[in-house]
Image: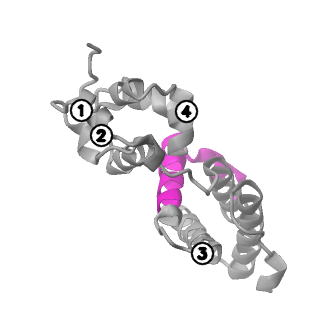
Amino acid sequence: MIGRAMGNNVRELRLALLLTQKELAGRMGADVKEVERLEATGDELSIEWVEAVSRALGVPRTAVTDPSADIRSIVARAAPAAVKKMRTCPIAARFAIQAMVAKLGGLKLALSLSEEDLARTVQNLVTYVESGELDTDEQRLNRLSLSLQIIVLTVLQSRGVVPGPGFQDAMEKARKGAMSLLQEFSEFAPYDAAAET
């Protein structure tokens, strides 16, 4: 039997489902280094990470955190076909967020964002955008656009950036560029930035 990390069952679930760390990272919209960290940590996972692992593996959230979970029976009930492929590219989302922060708050601020902060914001964005089961591409794109703006504003405000004159126009230009990037690397109908003007 594989030894369990105190606080989570990520490694055990991943191995029982015959996934590599890279495959799990892809399903979660995270970097392989994040999966390595989650598996190696003795700490409890944040709710965002529990949700991401649960969704990626198609298992209940309690299976990720319960030290007495019966991994074998959980895996037997997990339906890999039920794991939905993400349509929002998490890597594009990461760079879109960082690019918007750089445009609106400066490159130094964008580069100061920790990998953990970026990973958490991407997880939140992807979860929000992917949450609608029967949504049209237009509805998902609207959620994506709205969540990008909220995330970037939150980051800027948390770092003490005070919007000056022309901020709204700069935000709009940055958002359109970020949406074009996300559209190019995600699976949505073509995004037409010109249609918004």
Q: Position of residue 104 (x, y in %)?
A: 69, 66
Helix or strand or loop: what does disc 1 sit on?
Answer: helix
Q: Nearer the viewer, mark 1 or mark 3?
A: 1
Task: Say whether disc 3 or disc 4 marks the residue closer to the N-terminus.
Answer: 4
Label 1–label 2 contact, CB within 8 A: yes
Determine whether, in the image, residue 171 is placed left or right of residue 117.
right
Task: Say whether disc 3 or disc 2 marks the residue closer to the N-terminus.
Answer: 2
Residue at the image position 47 percent from the left and 59 percent from the top: 127
Q: Position of residue 120 (x, y in %)?
A: 47, 50
Q: Amino acid at mark 4?
A: Glu
| Residue, disc 4 | 23
The residue positioned farthest toward the top in the image shown: 1
Q: Nearer the viewer, mark 4 or mark 2?
A: 2
How far is mark 1 from mark 3, CA to CA?
36 Å
Residue numbers of the magenta segment: 106-127
Task: Say whether disc 4 or disc 2 marks the residue closer to the N-terminus.
Answer: 4
How far is mark 4 from mark 2, CA to CA?
20 Å
| Residue, disc 1 | 73
- Within the image, what quadrant is residue 136 found in? bottom right
* Picture quarter with the C terminus: bottom right
Task: Say whether disc 1 or disc 3 marks the residue closer to the N-terminus.
Answer: 1
**Would you call the spot at circle 2 few (<14 residues within 10 Å), some (14-19), or many (20 or more)?**
few
Is 141 in front, or is 166? 141
Q: Amino acid at mark 2?
A: Arg
Give the number of marks: 4
Label 3–label 4 contact, CB within 8 A: no
| Residue, disc 2 | 77
